[in-house]
Amino acid sequence: MATKAEKAAAQALSMAMKELPAIVAATVAGSFVFTSKAVHLPLIAAGLVLVNETDVPVNEAGESATKATEAGIAKAAELAAAAGTVTAEAAAPAKLVIVLEDDVAMPEVVATKGGGVGRESIYPFKTMNVNQSFFVPATDKMPKPWESLASAIANAEKKFAVVKTIPLTNEDGSAKLDAEGKQEYKTVMKTTKSREKGKEGQEKQVPVTTKTRTFKALKSSEEYPKGSGITVDGARIWRTA
């Protein structure tokens, strides 16, 4: 019969195992995950992970940089295969791992349109270079990310857009300068219809903007996490310009 200590250790390991797929995903992507002692100590005891507090200092939350061992990677693949599911919850139930990749060929199809205003994106639009991309797996909460991410993409394109201006001139055609001798500019405006509640359809003036970055999301089926041997449906998002 198991002792209280053995039962407690088994329970701690069971809880920590929920984090293993995310640690594995980061490891195979060449990265790591910060974890608490409650997570990594049981996994270390089981031979599934290692921590690195020498090269990567413990963070402000007291968490350590954690990577999976070969045994940990194999265990995660075994558990995912046994689960027999293709959602992200099976592959990475604890944390979403986003990996930027270069030069993944984009299929020549029309992407979903969308828009809207949302909070700060959790996706790496800010750091993406042209032709880089990342994969977002489908989940129970977001079963069609190739459609759901249209709003996030529209927000990102809007965030990086610049307002169009034209230089002002004097009546004689010369450049109009400010008090510091610098060229004055005028914002180019356009008429559009309001979507504000209570003002729907009313005309209003808004600045004309030019996109400086564009993104496209398309449906894709890929191995996730990489190295797991499990293929899941999801969306790959490219920066196209």
Image (cartoon, helix red, strand yellow):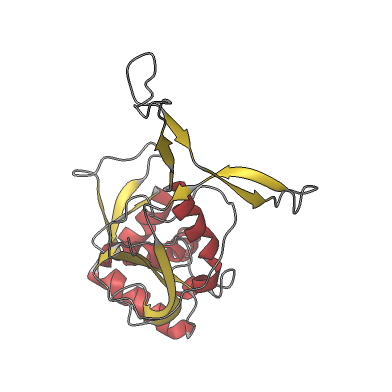
Q: Is residue 51 left or right of residue 43?
A: left
**Residue at the outermost right position:** 198
Q: Position of residue 226 (x, y in %)?
A: 30, 73
In the rendered view, tell whether residue 23 sits above or below residue 1. above
In the rendered view, tell whether residue 203 sits above or below residue 174. below
Task: Name the residue nearer the viewer: 51 or 126.
Answer: 126
Residue at image location 37% in from the left, 44% down from the top: 63
Task: Name the residue nearer the viewer: 112 or 121.
Answer: 112
Q: Position of residue 164 (x, y in %)?
A: 44, 43
Name which quarter of the figure residue 99 lies in. Answer: bottom left
Residue at image location 47% in from the left, 86% down from the top: 84
Task: Name the residue nearer the viewer: 86 or 41.
Answer: 86
**Residue at the outermost front position:** 172
Task: Name the residue nearer the viewer: 239 or 138.
Answer: 239
Q: Position of residue 168 (x, y in %)?
A: 42, 30
Where is the C terminus found, in terms of image quarters? Answer: bottom left
Name which quarter of the figure residue 33 lies in. Answer: bottom left
Q: Position of residue 35 (x, y in %)?
A: 38, 51
**Residue at the outermost left position:** 55
Residue at image location 46% in from the left, 65% down from the top: 18
Q: How many marks?
A: 0
Q: Is residue 107 left or right of residue 84?
A: left
Q: Can residue 98 be seen from the camera position used here?
A: yes
Q: Can residue 46 be seen from the camera position used here?
A: no
